[in-house]
Image (spheres, rainbow, N blue to C red):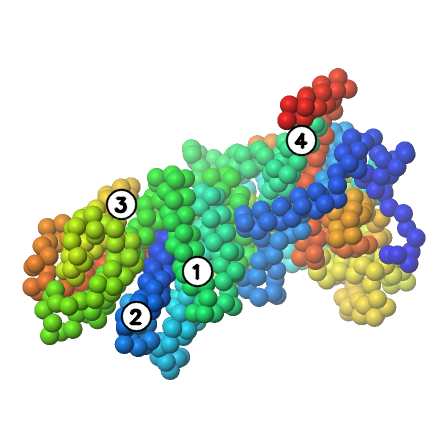
């Protein structure tokens, strides 16, 4: 990026006198902390993460290779009023998306009105088996991760909606726990909105979507197993919610019900929070080679014998060709004006868009319509000429498989790297939970591209995480009282 | 609880106990090497360590000589030997990782830390230096594991299965140790109580932390049949067969599930033979025969536990 003189919005510094008001206190504190102390806190965090086993496996590396996601000790701050907008916008999107999913698997009003093309029914993530299946509460995406980026003081964009098995929430929670351990004094000084109740909210929601008539529903979390890249998160959430962490082999189907194999015999399961993609949940219905799923699960699900979260078939709503229609969905289903904007997106299935994109590849980001995890994408400005040429050939082979977006000037946030504190690009993924209500806890996973200039924040591509602080306002009176108290403490020591 | 979870917990505990016992055997064997004339040759000293763990054959497929260096590497650090300390601790940690939810975070972190710490010994030739330190470390980590699980875990079935694994494995290990040593130390023609090397027997006692206990209980010079009595019948000797089965029968009583009639029967039968058995009768019929049968029955109990609770087909 160095060849192009672009300026980025910096979360801490893009303000009058070089510091935004929101960060004023923190910036002062950070300035006074010796670099060595910050570095030792970073090392302490790494040691603790390794000890606790907060690790992930990378596909393609040796089986069982466990890596740490880099953790940054400098938090990202959000003002309460910023958060207010983001959370309302995210909730609005998820409400519309759930209504869209219900519609697309029932009456298809949105196709009749022409907002969404009929082509969607041929989409690989569309599940014809789900047609006319009623899911409890009409909720499909019980857990949604909405990726949001920022380019200016008031410019937030939704980059994508993750509606299948979004991951990363454990880092939101563990990063918070770590920050409280490393910097307790900061938590007393600022009023940082707590996020620790996330698992409780999730569990209540999952219990609420059991089939009607189930009195004390049994919830389980279905994981692909200990070698999955997100296994730590599965184990963590199961533990925090106090539910069984099961693998496919632990479950079986009998009659119109799903049971788990326990030391006391079969036990009925009512709600499965599955962290397994549609294709793998049932070898009889989908991928016949799947060893991870439960034979017969899907037919029980269709007949209402068990609830799956997220529902089967949500993928049709989170790919990049559907993404383009979300603002229209909000107007159509809710009659509201979208609170959060989409990133302007070119659809390469359209002739004009394709021509424009091919002419401007070095300035654009091109993504596969159904890709995820930062794989299979072209970041024009950082790509070599050869990479651009290669990607052009891939696009031409199947244009409708791609969309393109302008390279967003993702905001940066000060980050501790080898050379000291330096700006690195960040994004934000709040997790929206749908059950009895649609809510989210005041916090998010903040991903940071640790390499200078990089815009790719995915952990599979070397991205790290930061704690996100939603600061509640404190009156000047409160602030001065706390400051005095902290000074007194020092004096007593 | 999930059968798979119970299975992982049970095996996790077994593997840690197995690693501890292997460390004990290596430790005392290395110590014996320091006693002049304790053994005729290096091979005579180290071969029994392989026999106790039951893998002398697989050792011979890979190594030509019973040198200290080969045996120690094979039993302590060899990833290709499924019963090496390395393999046991690796398996313990993999089992733990699969069910980290089912134990307290302290217990999980303890096992994870154990595995992380293990790397400090990798690549070292323990025969040259550091074997004692290594064995002490394995024992200490095993003690820590028992302490942290005992001190933090809810007394539910998960805890019971974990404890069950510990005692089934320990009973097996103590029986094997005694069997091999008794065989080797008592030449056939010699009367029980003949000229047995004091150091050899004290080493056996030390390997199960029973040296001081022996002095307290018998207040006498070390006699082989009394060592056997201590390790077989004494209920108050924590690594004895009787003590293990006192625990095992109690654990089976504590399990809330009602699917284990056969397990209880087998355990009760073994326990009765230890509770009401007399050492002179055991010797009359042959200690070796007794221990062989014991190891078989203990295995049978292990298999029954596997069938009744742990195999996922149980449901």
Which quadrant holds residue A412? Answer: top right
Instruction: Give SS at disc 3.
Output: helix
- Dot 3, how many residues are within 10 Å of its Cα: few (below 14), some (14-19), or many (20+)? many
| Residue B97 percent across, percent down from the top left | 48, 53
Q: Chain of mark 4?
A: A
- Dot 1, how many residues are within 10 Å of its Cα: few (below 14), some (14-19), or many (20+)? some
Instruction: Give SS at disc 4.
Output: helix
Q: Chain of mark 2?
A: B
Q: Residue furthest right?
A: A5
| Residue B206 percent across, percent down from the top left | 28, 57
Mark toward the viewer: 3 or 4: 4
Residue position marked by numbered label 4 in the rendering: A185
State the residue at coordinates (88%, 37%).
A18
Residue position marked by numbered label 2 in the rendering: B36
Q: Nearer the viewer, residue A220 or A476?
A: A476
Residue position marked by numbered label 1 in the rendering: B134
Q: Nearer the viewer, residue B15 or B198?
A: B198
Distance between the Cα atoms at labels 2 and 4? 63 Å
Q: Nearer the viewer, residue A160 or B38?
A: B38
Distance between the Cα atoms at labels 2 and 3? 45 Å
Q: Are the residues flagged by discs 1 and 2 from a single subunit?
A: yes
Distance between the Cα atoms at labels 4 and 1? 41 Å
Of the image marks 1 and 2, the number of the one nearer the N terminus: 2
| Residue A317 percent across, percent down from the top left | 67, 48
Of the image marks 2 and 3, the number of the one nearer the N terminus: 2
Q: Chain of mark 3?
A: B
Distance between the Cα atoms at labels 3 and 4? 47 Å
Which of the labelled discs sits on residue B251, or is there none?
3
- Dot 4, how many residues are within 10 Å of its Cα: few (below 14), some (14-19), or many (20+)? few
Contact between labelled residues 4 and 3, with CB atoms less than 8 Å apart: no
Q: Residue furthest front?
A: B36
Eyeballing the image, is A402 above or below A213?
below
């Amino acid at each position: 990026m160095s060849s192009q003189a672009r300026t980025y919005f910096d979360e801490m510094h893009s303000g009058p006198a070089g510091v935004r008001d929101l960060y004023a206190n923190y910036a002062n504190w950070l300035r006074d902390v010796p670099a060595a102390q910050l570095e030792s806190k970073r090392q302490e965090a790494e040691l603790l993460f390794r000890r606790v086993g907060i690790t992930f496996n990378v596909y393609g590396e040796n089986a069982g290779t466990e890596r740490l996601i880099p953790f940054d000790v400098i938090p990202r701050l959000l003002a309460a009023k910023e958060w207010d907008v983001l959370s309302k916008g995210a909730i609005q999107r998820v409400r519309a998306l759930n209504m869209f999913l219900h519609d697309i698997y029932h009456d298809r009003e949105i196709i009749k009105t022409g907002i969404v093309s009929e082509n969607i029914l041929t989409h690989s993530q569309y599940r014809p088996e789900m047609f006319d299946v009623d899911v409890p509460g009409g909720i499909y995406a019980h857990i949604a991760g909405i990726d949001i980026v920022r380019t200016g003081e008031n410019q937030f964009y939704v980059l994508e909606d993750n509606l299948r098995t979004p991951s990363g929430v454990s880092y939101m929670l563990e990063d918070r726990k770590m920050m409280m351990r490393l910097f307790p004094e900061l938590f007393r000084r600022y009023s940082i909105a707590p996020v620790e109740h996330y698992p409780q909210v999730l569990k209540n929601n999952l219990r609420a979507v059991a089939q009607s008539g189930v009195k004390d529903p049994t919830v389980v979390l279905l994981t692909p197993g200990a070698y999955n890249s997100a296994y730590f998160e599965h184990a963590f959430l199961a533990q925090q919610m106090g539910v069984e962490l099961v693998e496919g082999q632990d479950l079986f189907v009998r009659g119109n019900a799903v049971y788990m194999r326990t030391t006391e015999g079969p036990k009925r399961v009512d709600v499965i929070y599955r962290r397994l993609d549609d294709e793998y949940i049932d070898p009889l219905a989908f991928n016949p080679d799947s060893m991870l799923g439960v034979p017969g699960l899907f037919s029980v699900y269709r007949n209402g014998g068990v609830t799956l979260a997220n529902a089967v078939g949500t993928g049709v709503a989170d790919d990049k060709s559907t993404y383009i229609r979300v603002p229209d969905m909000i107007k159509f289903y809710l009659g509201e004006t979208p609170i959060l904007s989409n990133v302007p997106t070119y659809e390469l299935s359209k002739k004009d868009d394709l021509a424009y994109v091919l002419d401007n590849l070095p300035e654009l980001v091109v993504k596969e319509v159904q890709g995820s995890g930062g794989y299979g994408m072209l970041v024009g400005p950082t790509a070599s000429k050869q990479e651009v040429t290669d990607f052009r050939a891939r696009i031409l082979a199947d244009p409708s498989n791609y969309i393109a977006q302008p390279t967003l000037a993702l905001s940066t946030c000060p980050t501790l790297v080898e050379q000291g504190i330096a700006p690195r690009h960040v994004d934000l993924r709040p997790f929206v939970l749908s059950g009895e209500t649609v809510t989210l806890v005041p916090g998010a996973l903040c991903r940071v591209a640790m390499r200078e200039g990089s815009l790719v924040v995915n952990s599979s591509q070397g991205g790290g995480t930061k704690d996100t602080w939603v600061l509640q306002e404190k009156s000047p009176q409160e602030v001065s009282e706390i400051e005095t108290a902290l000074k007194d403490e020092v004096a007593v020591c | 609880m999930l059968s798979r979870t119970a299975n992982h917990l049970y095996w996790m505990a077994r593997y840690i106990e197995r690693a501890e016992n292997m460390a004990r055997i290596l430790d005392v064997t290395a110590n014996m090497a320091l006693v002049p004339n304790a053994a005729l040759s290096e091979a005579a000293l180290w071969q029994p360590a392989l026999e106790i763990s039951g893998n002398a054959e697989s050792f011979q497929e890979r190594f030509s000589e019973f040198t200290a260096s080969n045996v120690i590497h094979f039993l302590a650090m060899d990833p290709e030997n499924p019963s090496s300390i390395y393999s046991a601790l690796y398996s313990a940690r993999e089992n733990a990782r699969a069910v980290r939810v089912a134990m307290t975070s302290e217990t999980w972190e303890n096992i994870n830390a154990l595995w992380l710490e293990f790397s400090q010994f990798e690549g070292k030739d323990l025969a040259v230096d550091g074997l004692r330190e290594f064995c002490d470390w394995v024992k200490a980590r095993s003690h820590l594991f028992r302490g942290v699980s005992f001190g933090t875990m809810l007394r539910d079935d998960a805890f019971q299965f974990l404890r069950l694994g510990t005692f089934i494995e320990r009973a097996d290990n103590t029986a094997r140790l005694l069997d091999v040593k008794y065989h080797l130390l008592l030449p056939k023609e010699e009367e029980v109580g003949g000229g047995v090397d004091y150091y050899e027997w004290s080493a056996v006692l030390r390997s199960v932390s029973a040296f001081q206990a022996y002095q307290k209980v018998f207040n006498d010079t070390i006699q082989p049949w009394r060592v056997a009595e201590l390790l077989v019948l004494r209920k108050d000797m924590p690594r004895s067969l009787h003590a293990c089965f006192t625990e095992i029968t109690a654990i089976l009583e504590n399990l809330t599930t009602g699917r284990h009639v056969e397990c209880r029967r087998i355990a009760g039968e073994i326990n009765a033979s230890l509770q009401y058995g007399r050492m002179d009768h055991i010797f009359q019929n042959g200690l070796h025969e007794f221990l062989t049968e014991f190891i078989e029955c203990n295995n049978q109990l292990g298999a029954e536990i596997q069938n009744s609770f742990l195999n996922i087909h149980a449901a």
